[in-house]
Amino acid sequence: MTITVQFLIYSAIWIITFSIYIYAIKKYSFRTIGLSLVYLFNFSIVHFWGSVFFISPGYWNNQLEETITGYKYSTIAFVCFCIGSLVFYFNWGKNNKLNENQIRYHKIGEEPLLYFLMGFVLFFILKNKIIGIPTLTAFVSMGQQLLIVGLCLLLYKNYYLGRKFTFSFLIIFSFLIPFITIINDGLLGTGLAMFLTVIVFLTNFYKFNFRYLMIVLIGIFVGLSFYQSYLRDRQEIRDLVYGGATISERVEQLNYTLTNLELFNPFDSEHLDRINNRLNQNWIVGAAVIYMESESEEYAKGATFKEAVFNVVPRVIWKNKPSFAGDTSRVEKYTGLKFAEGTSVGMPQVMELYINYAVYSVILGFFFIGLIFSYFDYKAHIKIHNGEFDKFVYYFLPALAFMRVETPILESISGAAAGIGIAYGLQKLPKQYNSIIFLILFFISLIFILKKYYLPLIQNLL
């Protein structure tokens, strides 16, 4: 069997499995808010799109053997996640605790806007000032996700209250998030993940059907075209951002990328290389599998799981905690690869599970991840439709910590713990202070927008 045929078979398994999964969710009307789907989309971005293009005739690179090996195990992981998720839904996810006719009549408070402003302040104002401070970094990293939590709740609120203008404005803002993160941080991936979460959330109450498949396919093509064009100009964009360029200069560079968009060509090796070099996480999974099978390194046998448990302890309490985010030495140990000093290489979740107990931990691990995600998904759906927004955050926010599938579970555990802490704090926040907090956050946000974006643009025009 040729390698091209293997890539074709694994890709077909992904598409068929995902199609069955979507069909089952729609046919049986499972109680889901979209968390499991967001995870699958994020997983596909780094394990599917970086490998499916090897089907293209004549495409080849020097990571071919590692990629096909990693693609095999990520396919196993993808299927096992879907099975675990469907097992949960068929057994527990169909329990109807809601009166659908009363959903729109809940007294919907101001929590959505409050969460949105909290996330805005943390994401755009405080993030760069706190990064590097032990413990606070984890809380700020998860706290900024309140921007997405609040945006999702605002969409839900305005949809059911029939506020079409506000709802449309929020949709437009959601589309702009990836461009905002490019201008602000020089990063597309962060904004893309946020946008994806919002859109998948939206599909759960703004009913779509298979007639929209063509729109989805066009969206994928346009997305790939923009993504590989962004990768073409990424260094220039980041030089401006990290070099302290003005907002006008950054917008001008982004405008250049948009106006010089290269339509994605699956037969253009340069286009494929750009996407493969950035999205292909299968090669590092495959490198670990090949290295471990050669008996060059013993299996971890649960060691990384223990690290994940230890990682929950805040560094402010345990100053000499051995594990830390971006630790490349663990990847080097289990792949035999050496990376340049200062390079941060994350360990994909598939790789982390494999290096413990080989394929067995991949199968069981992703089966249980599917179960757990579906539980959080189901509970979030129940809470939001019962109007319990503060309790909705308990399930929605921690789950977002696991969406970065290209990073090890130990980092996700730490983020989830911080998310639970934030959700607990929001629930205990006295509601009589909501208006005061709202006003403070609103004015902080307004001053920030005027100072950083509006005034520089006006000065440039003048």
Image: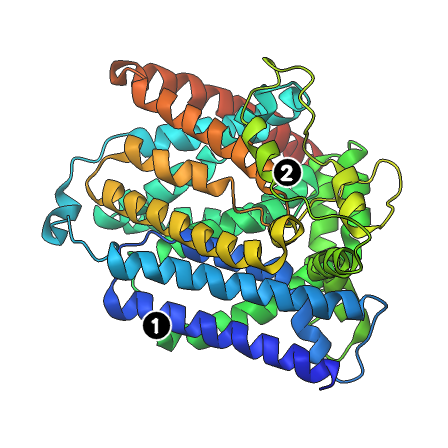
In front of the other: 238 or 324: 324
Work out whether residue 265 can be spotted. no
Name the colouring of the figure.
rainbow
Looking at the image, is mark 2 or mark 1 earlier in the sequence? Answer: 1
Going 58% across and 25% down the picture, which residue do you hit? Answer: 125
Q: Is residue 361 left or right of residue 368?
A: right
Image vertical order of residue 59 relative to residue 230, above or below: below
Q: Residue at x 68, y 84 (%)?
A: 5
Give coordinates of residue 58: x percent, y percent: 80, 83
Of helix, strand and loop, which one carries label 2? helix
**In the depicted structure, whether residue 281 falls above or below residue 221:** above
Name the residue rendered at 68%, 69% in the picture: 51
Is 369 situated left or right of 108 in this image? right
Tell me the residue that label 1 is attached to.
23
Could you say whether the residue bearing mark 1 is in a helix, strand or loop? helix
**Toward the viewer: 80 or 282?**
80
Q: Nearer the viewer, residue 221 or 372?
A: 372
Please state which amino acid type lies under the numbered disc 1.
Tyr
Q: Which mark is residue 8?
A: none
The amino acid beneath tag 2 is Ala
Res 206 quadrant in image: bottom left
Q: Kindly identify the residue that appears in the image at 29 percent across and 33 percent down.
A: 391
CA distance separating discs 2 and 1: 38 Å
122 vs 417, nearest the viewer: 417
Q: Is residue 272 visible?
A: yes
Residue 238 in the image, given as x and y percentages of width and height = 77, 42
Q: Is residue 214 above or below residue 252?
A: below
How dense is the environment of label 2, judged by Cα within 10 Å: few (below 14), some, or many (20 and up)?
few
Q: Quadrant of residue 260?
A: bottom right
**Residue at mark 2:** 303
Residue 456 position in % (x across, y down): 67, 31
Tell me the quadrant of the picture where the N terminus can be found. Answer: bottom right
